[in-house]
């Protein structure tokens, strides 16, 4: 039973570029949340997708956008990258009707130069 | 003011000793509370949920004080493998999937 998988594991971009990160939820899960974790900080909630719609959003600019596909996988897109976007991006999945337990993927480490 | 605040540590603990630390939260509407463990730059993993009556899982004991809005974690008989960052996590009742994380408390268990 595969857990939450994210790709790529590492990525290097330059300022102003755009990036797409991908997440496949744990088998049986239907909800995906994205988090940004800067060095020395806790993860910060970006947004959550359920039934292919963004259901909740944290305090992130609209340069951050996402998508959920019919198979429940999800993408996080970041436009016009800034140096401050360098962070570990974590995807978490859960079952919307099955309680609050979330499972995290191992993340994508994004470096913006 | 941050919604969830933790002492960053590090807490240096001799193997076999007991260590305890707290976190405070600002949103009185928070309804669910958790401790996650995170090893260096890896994904957070759920350690335990925290219930109002307090709960224990082996060597780990979690307490919740709603009146003072803090959560505690106690680790007994510390093992070298307990070295990690412990993240305090809070969720408001109407925000399924939206967890508020503290910045973490680092614990280093030494031989």
Image (cartoon, rainbow, N blue to C red):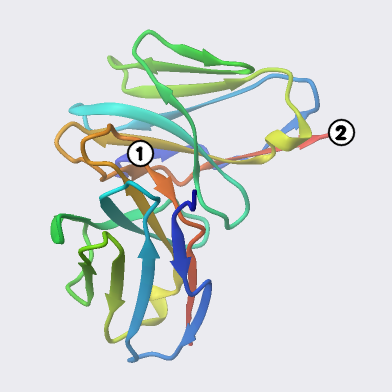
**Residue placed furthest toward the top:** B53
Residue that appears at 26% across and 62% down: A71
Asked if residue B84 lies left or right of residue A95, the reply is right
Residue that numbered label 2 is attached to: B111
What percent of the width, then of the height, locates residue B46?
A: 48, 36
Please tell me whether mark 2 or mark 1 is closer to you in this view.
2
Quarter of the image for residue B84 reads top right
Residue that appears at 46% across and 54% down: A41
What percent of the width, then of the height, locates residue B77?
A: 74, 18
Categorize mark 2 by other alpha carbons within 10 Å: few (<14), some (14-19), many (20+).
few
**Secondary structure category for the residue under label 2:** loop
Q: Is residue A43 above or below residue B73?
A: below
Q: Is residue A52 above or below residue A76?
A: above
Mark 2, chain letter? B
On the rendered image, what quadrant is the C terminus of chain B found in?
top right
Q: Nearer the viewer, residue B12 or B42?
A: B42
Residue that numbered label 1 is attached to: B4
**Secondary structure category for the residue under label 1:** strand
């Amino acid at each position: 039973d595969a857990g939450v998988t994210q790709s790529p594991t590492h990525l290097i971009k330059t300022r102003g570029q755009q990036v797409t990160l991908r997440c496949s939820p744990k088998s049986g899960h239907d909800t995906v949340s994205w988090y940004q974790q800067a060095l020395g900080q806790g993860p910060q909630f970006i947004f959550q997708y359920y039934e292919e719609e963004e259901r909740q959003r944290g305090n992130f600019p609209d340069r951050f956008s996402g998508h959920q596909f019919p198979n429940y996988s999800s993408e996080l897109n970041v436009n016009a990258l800034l140096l401050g976007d360098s962070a570990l991006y974590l995807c978490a999945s859960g079952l919307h009707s099955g309680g609050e337990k979330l499972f995290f993927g191992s993340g994508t480490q994004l470096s913006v130069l | 003011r941050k919604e969830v605040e933790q002492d960053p540590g590090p807490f240096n603990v001799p193997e076999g000793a007991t260590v305890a630390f707290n976190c405070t939260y600002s949103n009185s509407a928070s309804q669910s509370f958790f401790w996650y463990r995170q090893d260096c730059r890896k994904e957070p993993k759920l350690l335990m949920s925290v219930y109002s009556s307090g709960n224990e899982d082996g060597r780990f004991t979690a307490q919740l004080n709603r009146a003072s809005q803090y959560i505690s974690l106690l680790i007994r008989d510390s093992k070298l493998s307990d070295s990690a960052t412990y993240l305090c996590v809070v969720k408001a009742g109407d925000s399924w999937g939206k967890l508020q994380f503290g910045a973490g408390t680092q614990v280093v268990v030494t031989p």
